Image (tube, helix red, strand yellow):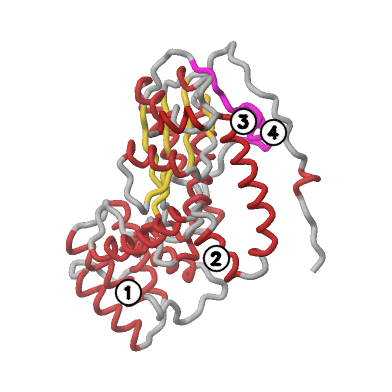
Amino acid sequence: MRALLKRIITKEQVEQLRMRLEQFDRFILPFFVKSRFLSSFYYCFFSRRFAREHQSVLKGRIQYYANSDAPENSSVLLRRNIHRLEKGIIMRPQRATFAEGYIGETVAQFNKCFRAKRLNGEEEKWAKEVLLRYFALVGESDIINAARREFFDAMADQQNCDKNLASVPYAHKDIVRADISFEQFKQLCVQRRSVRWFQDKPVPRELIDNALNAATLAPSACNRQPFEFYLFNEPEQAQKVGAIPMGTAGFSHNFQSVVVVVGDLAAYPYERDRHVIYIDGSLAAMQFMLALETQGLGSCVINWPDVEQLEKKMSKLLKLSHNQRPLMVISLGYADPEGKIPFSQKKSAKELIKEVSL
């Protein structure tokens, strides 16, 4: 049937049809933008471009509650609430009592994970120590006292002390300073360009791990870190994955290593947070690429628009669930010294800064 259609419909006719549909779409847009209802109607009946996101967000919400009931290695709910406690601890002036709205939930989640040994050692240590500091500082109320008893009942061998806690808020003056100047950092940013031509040379896993350890230090909303880095460090696999995005046909054949940054919507119970995977994933990815550069490795972020066919192909290859979404593809390796890179003039600070009088 498809072969028959190809004989009947020429490429020129297909292109003409596409252009007419696009013209019709542009014609009706001003009507459907008049209200939220009409906009929703448009995306229900005239365009299904957000259908995957809708399903992914709902699947993510379901998975969030499932993961909260039985977390493995890390608990998003606990990470979020412990970070909220940290923010309460650093407030100036500090309130006598705070976190009453979620301290019971936080302690219950911690005790569940602690007893079942669900957390990795560093996350458990951080959560326990922040709770110890919180209960040492906070005043009393019926809610707080109940949570305090529940916490220390689980921590039978712990003392309510505030000594030798390493994973709690600290003063800015205690930060160990990096021995780099602004000019050195700017030069690193100038140096890090999008590399599309790589040497036929293996990329040591140790260097990638180093860069990922730096990436984990990037800011993340409520410290949830809703992303994973899918690594393909064999040229054959890297080239197969790198050929999926649009725009790599002319150079993906020389990829040595590829990372797919994948966001997980299971980190959120509410639709309002659906875009955080893109923000947090991008912050981590930028630190990852700068860290690669300091170790002599080039990188290139490959555009990943929301194209249904490509989303399906990538999701199938990576065995992703519906709540996981590819955010970007990054190729990396030792840059070919003779390989050309685009000049790509950037905007100036003057062009980017908008000063608004309030």
Residues drawn in magenta = 180-198
Query: At which x and y percent is residue 18?
Result: 59, 41
Whether residues under marks 1 and 3 lie with C-beta atoms below 8 angstroms apart, the answer is no
- What separation in Å lies between label 1 and label 3 (alpha carbons)? 44 Å
Name the residue rendered at 24%, 55% in the picture: 72
Q: Earlier in the sequence, mark 2 or mark 4?
A: 2
| Residue assigned mark 4 | 183
The crowd level at tag 2 (other Cα within 10 Å; few <14, some 14-19, many 20+) is some
- What separation in Å lies between label 3 and label 2 (alpha carbons)? 45 Å
Q: Earlier in the sequence, mark 3 or mark 2?
A: 2
- What separation in Å lies between label 2 and label 4 (alpha carbons)? 49 Å
Query: At which x and y percent is residue 102?
Result: 38, 76
Which numbered mark, 1 or 3, is in the foreground of this view?
1
Residue type at mark 4 is Glu
The crowd level at tag 1 (other Cα within 10 Å; few <14, some 14-19, many 20+) is some
Quadrant holding the N terminus: top left
| Residue assigned mark 2 | 40
| Residue assigned mark 3 | 188
What kind of element bears circle 4?
Answer: helix
Which numbered mark, 3 or 2, is in the foreground of this view?
2
Which numbered mark, 1 or 4, is in the foreground of this view?
1
Vertical placement of 270 versus 225: above or below?
below
| Residue assigned mark 1 | 105
- What separation in Å lies between label 4 and label 3 (alpha carbons)? 9 Å
What kind of element bears circle 2?
Answer: helix
Name the residue rendered at 51%, 20% in the picture: 251
What kind of element bears circle 1?
Answer: helix
Q: Earlier in the sequence, mark 4 or mark 3?
A: 4
- What separation in Å lies between label 1 and label 2 (alpha carbons)? 36 Å
The numbered dot on residue 166 is none
